[in-house]
Image (cartoon, grey):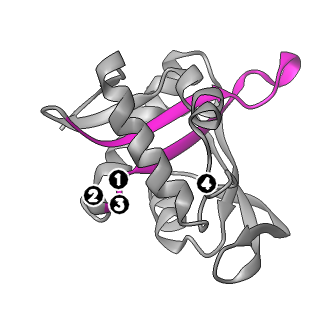
Amino acid sequence: MEIRTYRKEDVPQIWEIFQKVVSTGDTYVFPTDSSYSVFEENWLKYDPVVACEGDEILGTYIIKKNQMGLGSHIGNGSYMVAPDCHGKGVGKKLGLHSLKFARDQGFKGLQFNLVVSTNEAAIRLWEKIGFKIIGTTPGAFMHKSYGYVDAHIMFRDLSDMG
């Protein structure tokens, strides 16, 4: 598996993953019927990184500033894995890659502003690679199946990385 910055020819596959992931209404705040312009504005403009095998894109992540100005030293990460690749280690490899990527971009820490509490697999993964839940917002996510559920804020200090 190769992890690299996306190329123009990857965009259709990244868009397909984005559509599949947000359409479930169980992990991302994007409207379940998000348009291509939503994808461009909220994913593509941040120069996504992709995990691929040959020409097939298995997953993607973006890192951006969590806040402007005096808060811009903390990165914000978002990750999507193609549904047919769940459970194959793609998310973990993307997560580990993103820690070094974020540090190399000058970020002192990496934060997830909204990890849906019912997304137990993601929470376990992030905790395995050093993230901690630093807060919980009650009822912050309108889950397609469960209604209002809690959302966690997770953080990983990057200063301990060599």
Q: Residue 85 carries which label?
A: 2
> What is the distance, in whole Å, between disc 2 and disc 4 at their CAs?
22 Å
Residue 136 location, x and y as percent? 80, 65
Location of the N terminus by quadrant is top left
Label 3 sits on a secondary structure element that is helix
**Which sits earlier in the primary sequence, circle 4 or circle 1?**
4
- Asked whether the viewer can see residue 83, the reply is yes
Crowdedness of circle 1 by 10 Å Cα count: few (<14), some, many (20+)? many
Question: What amino acid is at disc 4?
Answer: Asp
Above or below for 162 versus 20? above
Q: Which residue lies furthest to the bottom in this view?
A: 146
Q: What residue type is labelled 2?
A: Cys
The mark total stands at 4
Residues tagged 2 and 1 counted as in contact (Cβ below 8 A): yes
Q: Distance between the residues labelled 3 and 4?
A: 17 Å
Residue 4 spot, x, y in % from top left: 31, 24
Q: Please name the residue that numbered disc 3 is placed on.
A: 83
User: Please, what is the three-letter code of the amino acid marked with disc 1?
Assistant: Ala
> Gap in Å between the C-alphas at discs 4 and 1?
17 Å
Circles 2 and 3 in contact, beta carbons < 8 Å = yes
The span picked out in magenta is 56-83
Q: Residue beneath label 4, please?
A: 33
Mark 1 — residue? 82
Q: Could you classify mark 3 by the number of other residues whose Cα lies within 10 Å: few (under 14), some (14-19), or many (20 or more)?
A: few
The part of the image, by quadrant, that contains residue 89 is bottom left
Q: Pointer 1 and pointer 3: residues touching (CB < 8 Å)?
A: yes
Q: What element carries label 4?
A: loop
Label 2 and label 3: CA atoms lie apart by 5 Å
